[in-house]
Amino acid sequence: MSDRSSTSAGGRKEEPGPTQAKPDGAGGYAHKWLKGKRAANKRPATAGAANGESPQCFFADHYPPEVVTSPSERSLLQLVCSERTDRCLHPLQDNINLRHLARAKAWDIVRNGYFSHESPTYGSIYDMIRRANIPFHYAGENLGKAGSYHVVHRRLMGSSGHRRNILNPRFDQVGIGVIKGQFSGVVVVQAFTGLIDGPGYLSARTKRVRGRLL
């Protein structure tokens, strides 16, 4: 099986207002930028703290703890942040609410036997982020499955849609879930968010830099 067919074929991303992602040739979703001006006083899509943990993590009990591989999650976070800092981008902050969300989505994929950005249980990544009461102006999702998280990371970086999410200067928060697969290997979900006043917003306005890195 080729790398492309065993990894979702493009991340999902949102700027203010929902994007209409179009299916690509391998069953994933194509990356899309929205154009147009945004209101200077536009509020985040949901209320809550921009960093860390909200009073209650909605998805914290939506997966069995024994299927989580926390060391792999930490190692994959380090790989993602290294990819960014090697290109002079700010590292992503680990958001525990997004991590619970990513684990819940990965477990839902394993439990229900599908591989898609649209969950039959939770809906889209945007629906899940809003349900978890996580503030965002921009959001994205990467999915991957393989024998190990190392292979997943290599395939994500080899896919233009996924790489754009990992290296997107607008994103400043991430949650990574690594769940044991049904038979072998792992399922990985990376959930990204960013705010207009976040650390990556000003750098993201430089299209020349964005075009060079992505």
Image: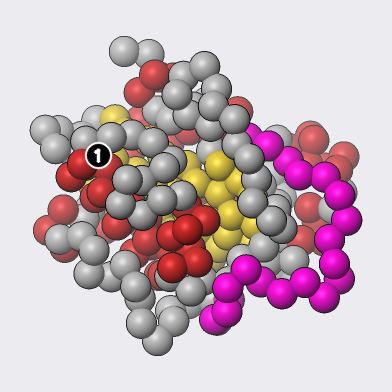
Placement of 110 over or under 14, stated as above or below: above
Q: In the picture, residue 46 is in which quadrant? A: bottom right
Answer with left or right where residue 187 lies relative to residue 65: right
Q: 75 or 111, which lies in front?
A: 111
Q: Is residue 171 visible?
A: no
Quadrant assignment for the N terminus: top left
Is 36 situated left or right of 74 in this image?
Answer: right
Residue name at image x 36 percent, y 46 percent? 119
Residue 69, compared with residue 188, is above or below; it is below
Instruction: Give the residue drawn at x 44%, y 81%.
Output: 54
> Is 30 situated above or below 180?
above
For the C terminus, give its image quadrant.
top right
Q: Amino acid at mark 1?
A: Val
Rate crowding at label 1 as few (under 14), some (14 to 19) or many (20 or more) other CA atoms within 10 Å.
many
Q: Is residue 10 magenta?
A: no
User: Residue 84 appears at what percent x and percent y?
Assistant: 62, 48
Based on the displayed image, in which of its 4 quarters is residue 144 positioned? top left
Q: Which residues are magenta?
A: 31-50
**Viewed as shown, does residue 70 lie left or right of 199?**
left
Mark 1 = which residue? 186
Residue lying furthest top in this view?
1
Q: Is residue 3 visible?
A: yes
Q: Quadrant of residue 96?
A: bottom left
